Amino acid sequence: MKINILKAAVVAVGVSIATVSCSDDFVETKFYQDVEQAPLTSLTEVQSFVRGMYTSMRAPSYYGRDYGLFAEIRSDEMYSNGAAGYYNTVNNYSMTSADAYARDTYRQIYTAVAKANILIGTDPNGIKGTVDEKEAVKYHIGQAYAMRAFFFFDLLKLYGQKYSGGTLGIVTPLKYDPKAMQARGTIAENEAQIESDFNAGLAMMEANSSSFGEGPSGSVDVTINAVKALMSRYYLYKGDYAKVRTLVNDIVASNEFNVIPASSYVSSWKFPQQNNSVFELAVGVAGSNSTDSWGYMFNYNGYSNTVMSEDLFAEYAPNDVRKNASMIQFDEEYYLNGKYPNLEGTDNIKIVRYEEVILNGVEAELNGGSAAKALQYYNMILVNRGLPAAGTVTMADLKLERAKELVGEGLRLWDLLRWGDPVPRPSGASTSPLLTSFPIPRVETDIAGTLVKPNPGYDN
């Protein structure tokens, strides 16, 4: 890989401070183009680059819209109806190596990786400031390790060959070097790197959280519990249920979060930093993607592009608050109006909610753990959605409940693939398993001297 694919990205001699106001408006961090990166020398600069990672994440081509919708469109719970011309190539498995969705998301995630690598390459001893400030820098470097693991994980799911029959993964640059050439690693090598980064990040954050008193709090920053939640998602993907159980137990025992009750379910999507939010991206007016936002694709009054399947809609009980509060039927289609309901695109973007963590725990307990604890976790969801508690829970129950609770949140395709369950394709779409992986963009594979091999089944 030659990192000059990241022309929009990364660095600066001058860096403006990104802040979050009390209204959660997010001031864009300025990352100047084509300037060789100078070492970060202050806590302020380090914090600005942390905010810069979050800014990259909330772009429309990443978590601001596209990445989560890729996993919904290609699933059994939602689909793209082609409205406004969005996602046709993704939905129909007709992408080419020049496809804008594949190219832009690839570029955006590697931009976030580059920012993480600048933070990871920072020498805490070179920071001008107090001992506490240097410890805080180490904490932020830990955040960067954890987020790099998460970025690599997202890249691996989308562009790696795990579910398309191959062994290649992704490029994993471990330092910021715009001139570097690097080949794709194997899936096994990638997974080892992701695990190493998660563990390194968590250890650094835990060792240096004292510089913040009791440690940073607030779901718009990557906290220790947020890292554990993201790790539980990763280990669920790997099928390492023992590690998922440990991580979920730790998060539950912290007593920091709650499954949002039925009475607050609607408002939990309208207002930022609710007590079920483990990690979310601050947006507000300044950071809004407006009509390029995730919610604008769902909402009937927006582009109404990504709609719920009739089969899933029929699974909700009449008194389920999720059905009554957040879904509407119009012209024989079912719209998820209640998640990201603000058409101005100012809603914070939920990266991981406590409900997902609890459902991760259900699945992990059903696979080698405690049936009683699995049921306890399962009922935490049911009773807070206005439903009666269950007496038993099975994997089939868990799979359906994940669909009902997490619909529209960008997880379903990966759930189906890791379970080995059928993934529907629209009539007329290619049935080739090779096309499960996105194409490696031509702008990457056409670079002179590139070491990056394309994914088979495409035109590069």
Image: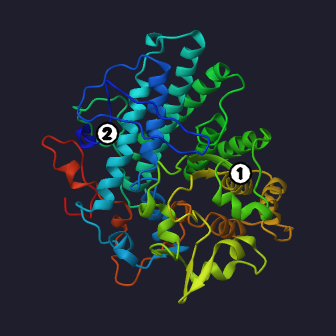
Quadrant (top left, top right, bottom left, bottom right) of the C terminus: bottom left
Give the residue number, with chain letter if any, for mark 1.
276
Crowding near the residue tagged with mark 2, few <14, some 14–19, many ≥20 C-alpha atoms within 10 Å:
many
* Residue 263 visible to an observer of this rendering: yes
Q: Residue at x 70, y 61 (%)?
A: 267
The spot of residue 197 in percent (x, y) is 50, 33
In this rendering, would 70 be left or right of 243? Answer: left
Q: Please provide percent x and percent y for residue 335.
A: 56, 77
Distance (Cα) linking label 1 and label 2: 32 Å
- Residue 16 in picture, x, y percent from top left: 40, 30
Q: Is 177 left or right of 401, judged from the image as shown? A: left
In the foreground, 341 or 231: 341
Q: Give the side of residue 370 with respect to residue 358, left or right.
A: right
Quadrant where the N terminus sits is top left
Other residues around mark 1 within 10 Å, as few (<14) / some (14–19) / many (≥20) = many
Residue at which label 2 appears: 9
In this orientation, which residue lies closer to the viewer: 127 or 180? 127
